[in-house]
Every structure is written in structure tokens, then in C-alpha cells.
């Protein structure tokens, strides 16, 4: 169900990009929008893992550096039939973890110093199984593409603002014209909001799927459920200083907000995630 939902949302995001390009400048700008998205995708695909690991000052660790952490990842990778990823430690007391890398053969998992302090071995296994599930499900690539397309739409919105200021884009041929002032206003105001909502919905869908896949990898959904309960409390007490652009990568949303802000959240409600895992443990949903 979550896979089908993600596919529908990705199609919707792509259609939105095409419509935004068309509204801004007709066929020429639709082609340009695709070119922007492809360029952004390519850069993110090859370099995003290095950038985010450096951003959080993550240090690669070996089995001798952090024996239990490393062995947990190694055992889970074997259970999931995945290549052994690189293992990183983030020097922060804010409890959190993420996975990155362009594919299962070039993947890395990272955990903060804080998460290793508060979780027992079973709970740590639940968390790292969740991260390896992202690798197995290729969520890193899906999230990268979604972010790139949403970014391209935001770029078109900025172009629309300049077009409004300087009198719009030229072009004498009818099929190269955009949607006029109404189209430009839609690109400026509505398209970025719609893109962000779709991007957040994709991220939430993949979190649910990673919880379910991770529960299968570690063998017990309650391990992850217990870890999420601890992380929900501890992350509020010691929040991670995170860049909003990378919030979707973490197992616990480092950015907090309620009400309307929940519409733009990269993560599902924690209570709902825990309830699904407990239901899965006792013979419920799959």
C-alpha cells in the first residue's frame, strides 16, 4: 500500500513540475524544468551522502572503535541480505540516526552519541533495522528525487517572481507562451506549497514502510516501538541541531511543530508509528 502511494505521489510531483513549467513559459520552460530536475538529481545522487555526513561531523567507526554498534549493524545487514554499509558516529547528545548513500552497495548508517547512550541492544537493533530498511527499499534515492523535483518547482517560483517584476518572459509563438499572469501567480504561490505537501507525504509514507520492513529485519516490531518511545521523549529534552533540509532523513523528526505545521512534517505522528508496530507485533497489519 505504501509503495503504491509513493508511486502515485511521485507521479503527482512530476506532473506538478511539468504544469509549473508550462504555466511559466510554455513548452520551452517545461523542457527547462525537466533539465533542472535532472541536473539536481544527478548531483544529489552522487554527492548527497558525503555532504550530509560532513554536515553533521560524522566519523566512520570500525568494530574496534564501537564494538556493539558495529556488530548490530553487521548482523542486521546479513539478515536483510544487504552489503555491509559504512558505519558512522555523530558527536551529538541529541538522540537520532539516519541512513544515506546512493544504493545498497554505497550506503552508510549513522547514529548519534546520544542514541547509543539511551538505547539497549534490542532497541538499537530496532533503530538500525529501520535505517537498513531505508537502504533496502531505496528510500534514499526516492527522497533525493522528490527533494530535487520539489526544489526545481521552487526555482520556477523564483523565476516567476522575476518575470512579474520585469514584465514576463518573451516569446512570440503561441505554443511557447505560458499561462499569463494567472499562471505565474499559481507558480509563485500554489506550486511550491503543493510540491512541499506532496514531498512531505512521500516522506511519511516511506517512514511507515521502513518501520514495517525494519521490524521484519530485526525480527521483533516491539524493539523499534520501544526505541521510538524513548527517542520521542529524549529528543524533546535534548534536541539535535539539524538542518531543516535533512530533517526527513532522521528516524525521529528533529524539527517540532503541531497544528498546521504537521501538514508539512516529514514524519508521521509518533503515536501512530508506535501503534502500528504494536499492532504488527500482535498479528495486525503488514
Image (cartoon, helix red, strand yellow):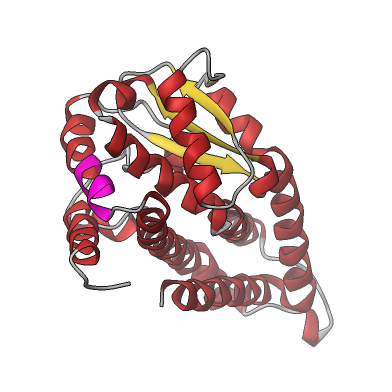
Residue 199, position as x, y percentages in the image: 47, 61
Position of residue 248 in the picture relative to residue 102 (left or right): left
Residue 119 falls within the magenta-colored stretch: no
Nearer to us in this view, 170 or 175: 175
194 or 215, which is in the foreground?
A: 215
Q: Is residue 21 left or right of residue 10?
A: right
Image x and y of residue 241, in percent: 36, 26
User: What x and y, as percent, mark residue 136?
Assistant: 55, 55
Q: Nearer the viewer, residue 258 or 22?
A: 258
Instruction: Judge whether residue 248 can be spotted in this image.
Output: no
Q: What residue is shown at x 41% (from left), y 78% (from top)?
A: 1
The part of the chain drawn in magenta is: 221-227
**Residue 230 appears anywhere in the view:** yes
**Which residue is drawn at the image coordinates 65% and 75% (left, top)?**
18
- The residue under the point 43% across, 26% down is 69
Q: Main secondary structure of the magenta part?
A: helix
Q: Residue at x 52, y 35 (%)?
A: 74
In this view, 223 is above or below 272: above
Image position of 162 (left or right of 189): right
Amino acid at each position: 500500500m505504501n509503495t503504491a502511494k509513493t508511486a502515485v505521489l511521485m507521479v503527482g510531483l512530476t506532473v506538478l513540475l511539468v504544469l509549473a513549467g508550462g504555466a511559466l513559459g510554455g513548452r520551452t520552460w517545461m523542457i527547462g524544468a525537466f533539465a533542472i530536475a535532472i541536473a539536481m538529481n544527478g548531483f544529489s545522487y552522487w554527492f548527497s551522502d558525503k555532504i550530509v555526513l560532513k554536515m553533521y561531523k560524522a566519523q566512520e567507526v570500525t568494530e574496534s572503535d564501537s564494538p556493539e554498534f558495529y556488530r548490530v549493524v553487521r548482523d542486521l545487514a546479513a539478515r536483510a541480505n544487504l552489503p555491509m554499509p559504512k558505519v558512522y558516529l555523530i558527536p551529538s547528545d541529541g538522540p537520532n540516526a539516519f541512513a544515506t548513500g546512493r544504493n545498497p552497495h554505497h550506503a552508510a548508517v549513522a547514529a548519534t552519541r546520544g542514541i547509543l547512550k539511551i538505547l539497549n541492544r534490542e532497541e538499537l537493533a530496532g533503530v538500525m533495522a529501520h535505517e537498513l530498511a531505508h537502504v533496502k527499499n531505496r528510500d534514499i534515492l526516492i527522497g533525493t528525487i522528490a527533494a530535487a523535483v520539489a526544489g526545481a518547482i521552487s526555482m520556477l517560483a523564483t523565476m516567476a517572481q522575476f518575470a512579474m517584476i520585469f514584465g514576463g518572459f518573451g516569446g512570440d509563438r503561441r505554443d511557447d507562451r505560458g499561462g499569463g499572469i494567472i499562471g505565474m501567480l499559481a507558480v509563485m504561490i500554489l506550486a511550491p506549497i503543493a510540491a512541499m505537501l506532496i514531498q512531505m507525504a512521500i516522506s511519511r509514507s516511506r517512514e511507515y514502510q521502513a518501520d514495517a520492513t525494519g521490524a521484519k529485519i530485526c525480527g521483533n516490531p516491539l524493539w523499534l516501538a520501544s526505541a521510538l518511545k524513548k527517542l520521542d521523549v529524549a529528543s524533546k529534552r535534548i534536541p539535535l541541531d539539524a538542518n531543516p533540509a535533512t530533517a526527513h532523513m532522521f528516524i525521529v523528526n528533529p524539527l517540532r511543530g503541531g497544528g498546521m505545521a504537521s501538514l508539512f512534517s516529514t514524519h508521521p505522528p509518533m503515536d501512530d508509528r508506535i501503534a502500528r508496530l504494536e499492532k504488527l507485533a500482535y498479528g495486525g497489519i503488514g
